[in-house]
Amino acid sequence: MVDVRSMKVDCSGFGFISASAGSEYPLAVASARKFLLAHCVKFAAAVALLLSSVNAGLAKDWTIDPAHSSAEFSIRHMMVSNVRGGFSNIKGEINYDEKDLNKTHVRATIDVSTINTKEPARDEHLRSPEFFDVSKFPTMTFESKKAIAKGPRKFQLEGDLTLHGVSKLVTLDVETSPEIKDMKGNERIGATATGKINRKDFGITYNKILDGGGVALGEEIPIVLEIEASKPKL
């Protein structure tokens, strides 16, 4: 197999034809030079186009599939149990190159109003100004800054999480699936990302002191993102 990324085309040699041939058949030589040089330039342009296509293909642009993606969290309640919840309607773009993580970039948006803890009254409270204040801050966003390799299809992703009007640097541990093709021929890839944030860092400070000591709600929030992304067939 030929690695086209190493191909180079040098057309300078087509300007040379022996002096004797040039003196005996000046018109033919001039025509031959012009013909060869023109076709060499065309070939070089074709190679350059091929190279740009190959390099562009290494870092693939994926679109997050909201129907098959979720963001989940848990919070300590009354210091005795964990309450779990999640968000849906995750949208965004992923540029991912497994062989060169410097080209990896993620930008995602989550609709905060989709919060679901399986208790409607609690969810309404979480949407209120005492917590997420969704009327003022309807979305949270994540934009990556750096990816650090940690093993085959594993890396740490650092980026800015903007939540409740506050942006903070967070780190996610990411593991990706192999790429596959679905029934329609579209490319698909999956990823699981885990991390922790402190809700007080984002200005979400609501709490109550328990009679026996301690607080009603924990501050450190473990998060898990299950992401599926697709790329249309060419």
Image (cartoon, grey):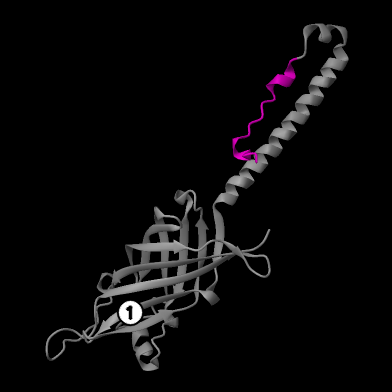
Q: Position of residue 115 (x, y in %)?
A: 41, 82
Name the foreground residue: 37 vs 206: 37
Q: Quadrant of the C terminus?
A: bottom right
Crowding around mark 1 (Cα neighbors within 10 Å: few <14, some 14 to 19, many 20+) is some
Q: Quadrant of the N terminus?
A: top right
What residue is rendered at 51% in x and 57% in y? 95
Range shown magenta: 1-16
Is 114 part of what is drawn in magenta?
no
Q: Give residue 55's quadrant in the image.
A: top right
With 72 as the anchor, is 34 left or right in this view? right
With 113 as the anchor, is 14 left or right in this view? right
Residue 164 appears anywhere in the view: no
Name the foreground residue: 222 vs 199: 222
Element type where label 1 sits in the image: strand
Q: Give residue 212's quadrant in the image.
A: bottom left
Q: Position of residue 225 (x, y in %)?
A: 42, 71
Q: Give residue 41's quadrant in the image.
A: top right
Total number of numbered labels? 1
What residue is rendered at 50% in x and 76% in y? 89
Q: Position of residue 46 (x, y in %)?
A: 71, 39
With 115 as the anchor, is 184 left or right in this view? right
Q: Which residue is mark 1?
A: 74
